[in-house]
Image (tube, rainbow, N blue to C red):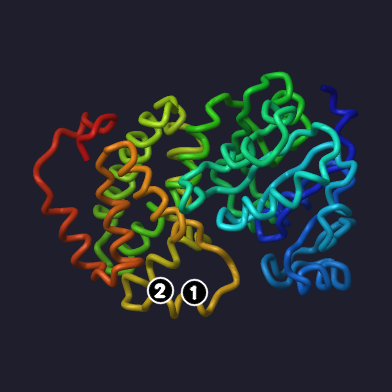
Amino acid sequence: MSDRQFRTAAVIGAGAWGTTLARHLAERGLDVRLWAYEAAVVGAIRDRRENTMFLPGVALPSITVTHSLEEAAGGADVVLFAVPSHAARSVLTQLAPVLTRPVPVISATKGIEEGSLKLMSQIMDEVLPPSMHRLRVVLSGPSFATEVCAGRPTAVLLAGDDPELISALQHRLLSPLFRVYAGRDVVGVQIGGALKNVMAVAAGIVDGLQLGHNARAALITRGLAEMVRLGVAMGAKPDTFYGLSGVGDLVLTCTGALSRNHAVGQRLGQGESLKDILAGTHAVAEGIHTSRAAAGLAERYRIEMPIVTQVCRVLFDGHSPRAAVGELMERAAKDETERWTNGG
């Protein structure tokens, strides 16, 4: 599959990341059609060439924006999917009939579906026709949208089942400031991209409580251990979690001031309620939804994920953030090398 076959791209989802990827694809010379759920976003991009709701201050090139999935995806050579995880199945179900021929679908969504506990690739396999299953790809890695738009160097990972397709997409996305690596571990890349958001909420709580750099470093390290433990149980390769979609994204999201998930955790640590925090923002903090899904997967695979458990208790059970940290610190002594087992 050559670069010449990727001329038209549909980007489904006009949040900060979807809009950024649409901008990047347009700068790479593709004819880009961006689908937005919000009418206000469609109007702002059409009238002002700016996504004032999710990516304010960033000028957008010539991108077609629409509220119609058929107008966005009909006839596209590649589809990039960047819808929040809680809406992914619904949008994919509406999108499937529009895709009248097999085309690559790249998932840039970092989350797990609540209820079913499915990864985005698994939802795609359920909703999209079998002829497209080998064409579904996942994109992840440490990538704040505003930094990509500002031209700051960024490296991400593209993973899928077809090495030839991955290579073709890799070279189409690659630019001097946006480096794209190739991978095969679709499950591991998605687990890393989803769970790092939960760990970022936990890191934010640590910072909100002003517990210091030592505590944050310990939280990130043990959070990585939980990510590896779940990933291995689900068939992922351990090495994946020491790459861009694992430790790379984890460190960025747990320490970067631009992280929505860290910001939610920090405000929780400072005493605000989740209800009040969510009332003041349009953006989705995926770690909130993913924490419950991750807890469900831990139960399904019978593994211990104490950080995930405590994040869920703080978010949904009214548990005190300070008490949650105390309970993590007071757990029974463990061997650190048990990180790939049920050691916790």
Q: Residue at x 70, y 49 (%)?
A: 93
Q: Position of residue 274 (x, y in %)?
A: 40, 73
Q: Residue at x 88, y 46 (%)?
A: 74
Image vertical order of residue 327 relative to residue 47, above or below? above
Could you tell me if the residues under marks 2 and 1 are in contact, i.e. CB atoms within 8 Å?
A: yes
Amino acid at pointer 1: Leu
Quadrant of the snapshot with the N terminus: top right
Q: Residue at x 85, y 61 (%)?
A: 66
Q: Report whether residue 16 is seen.
A: yes
Q: For residue 20, which quarter of the picture?
A: bottom right
SS at mark 2 in the image:
helix
Amino acid at pointer 2: Leu
Q: Position of residue 208 (x, y in %)?
A: 33, 69
Q: Which residue is mark 1?
A: 278
Q: Can you tell which mark lies on residue 158?
A: none
Q: Nearer the viewer, residue 16 or 273?
A: 273
Q: Position of residue 5 (x, y in %)?
A: 88, 29
Quadrant of the snapshot with the C terminus: top left
115 to the left or right of 68: left
Distance from the alpha carbon under mark 2 to that under mark 1: 6 Å
Q: Which residue is mark 2?
A: 274
SS at mark 1 in the image:
helix
Q: Position of residue 342 (x, y in %)?
A: 23, 34
